[in-house]
Image (tube, rainbow, N blue to C red):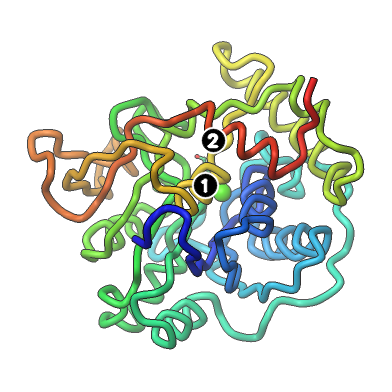
Amino acid sequence: MPPTGQMRSIILDVDTGIDDAWALVYAAQSPILNLMGVTTVFGNADLDRTTRNTLAVLDLLHRETPVFRGADRPLIRPWGGPVPEYHGHNGLGDAPVPGPKRRSEPLDAAHYIRAAVRKHPGEVTLVMVARLTNLARALLYDPGLAPLIERVVLMGGAAFCPGNVTPVAEANIWGDPEAADLIFQSNIPITMVGLDVTMQAPFTKDQLERLDPNRPYASLLRQATAFYMAAYELGNPSIQGWCPLHDPLAVAVAEDPSLVKTQRYPVRVETHGRWTDGMTVVDARQPHQGCIEVATQLDGPRFLRTFHQRIGVMSS
Ligand code: RIB
Ligand code: CA
């Protein structure tokens, strides 16, 4: 990975999604990240919605970053459906989403990832904050692609903590375990930003209330995030008055890897488990093996300081 502070080119893969929307805001306003393109996938909502939401958020940011539609279902299994209880029926907490001013590009996301990496070998970091289906499809089309990818930074998995869909599985991995396992076996250098660290990145109601109303996305994302916080409160007695910042943290780690401590471990994804489907099985007996850096600790205060500055949380 380029040293901390050096410019890096990323493709951001999203299922927008409330925390994906914050990831887009964080990435688009980064002084270090060159956001080459955004790819969309099913997940928090169906593909049409996640694509429309992505375009709408980029419009609000006045960005013309190209957006590429990707997979509308997992590689092999049927799609389990959207997640309205956390992301609303429209993927953005049922807040009114302005109609996008432009369309997505004609090229499919997997083909775009392939073309961009082939054009800039060794230079593109893929920041994946959704199901890993688009990248898996790119590798299936072009098995020679893996060594040309600089790194994958992904929000997904639960190494040494509970899952959030099942006792052991995190949503992005659980939503397409075959795709995830294919990526984990690909020998691409991976940074796994899982629930171990994203649950240590709280955004509070008080901070949300102090979001600068002059930011062009403030009205949409205040309403959407209030929905997300209420959903977390309802579903998790231990989470009251805040929500985790899963997806923006993965972008932040791509921008500044020193935000997390990592340890290399072999990781596989369970694809046949009766109770454990989608589990990220980390072989803690073999530290320093393989090419998957598992994030285990977060410098929370430093991440949150940058997040607040970047999105425009006014001081109290
Ligand atoms: O488990 C959290 C992840 O699942 C986030 O990426 C969220 O947007 C959903 O896709
Ligand atoms: Ca997501």
Q: Residue at x 55, y 12 (%)?
A: 238
Vertical position of residue 21 compared to residue 142: above or below: above
Left or right, 221 with respect to 32, comes to: right
Q: What x and y, as percent, mark residue 122?
A: 34, 76
Q: CA distance from mark 1 to mark 2?
A: 7 Å
Left or right, 22 with respect to 315, comes to: left
Vertical position of residue 234 compared to residue 290: above or below: above
- Few, some or many C-alpha atoms within 10 Å of disc 1 (few <14, some 14-19, many ≥20)? many
Q: What x and y, as percent, mark residue 316?
A: 80, 20
Q: Amino acid at mark 1?
A: Ala
- Few, some or many C-alpha atoms within 10 Å of disc 2 (few <14, some 14-19, many ≥20)? some
Left or right, 153 with respect to 31, comes to: left
First in residue order: circle 1 vs circle 2: 1
Looking at the rendered structure, the number of numbered marks drawn on it comes to: 2
Left or right, 170 with respect to 308, comes to: left
Work out which quarter of the rendered image holds the N terminus and state it: bottom left
Q: Residue at x 22, y 60 (%)?
A: 185
Q: Which secondary structure lies at badge 2?
A: helix
Q: Are marks 1 and 2 in contact (CB under 8 Å)?
A: yes
Q: What x and y, as percent, mark residue 307?
A: 63, 39
* Residue with the mark numbered 2: 303
Q: Residue at x 54, y 35 (%)?
A: 303
Q: Residue at x 62, y 58 (%)?
A: 31
* Residue with the mark numbered 1: 252
Quadrant assignment, res 283: top left
Q: Amino acid at mark 2?
A: Phe
Front residue of 100 and 255: 255
Q: Decide if ligand 1 comes within 8 Å of the CB at mark 1.
A: no
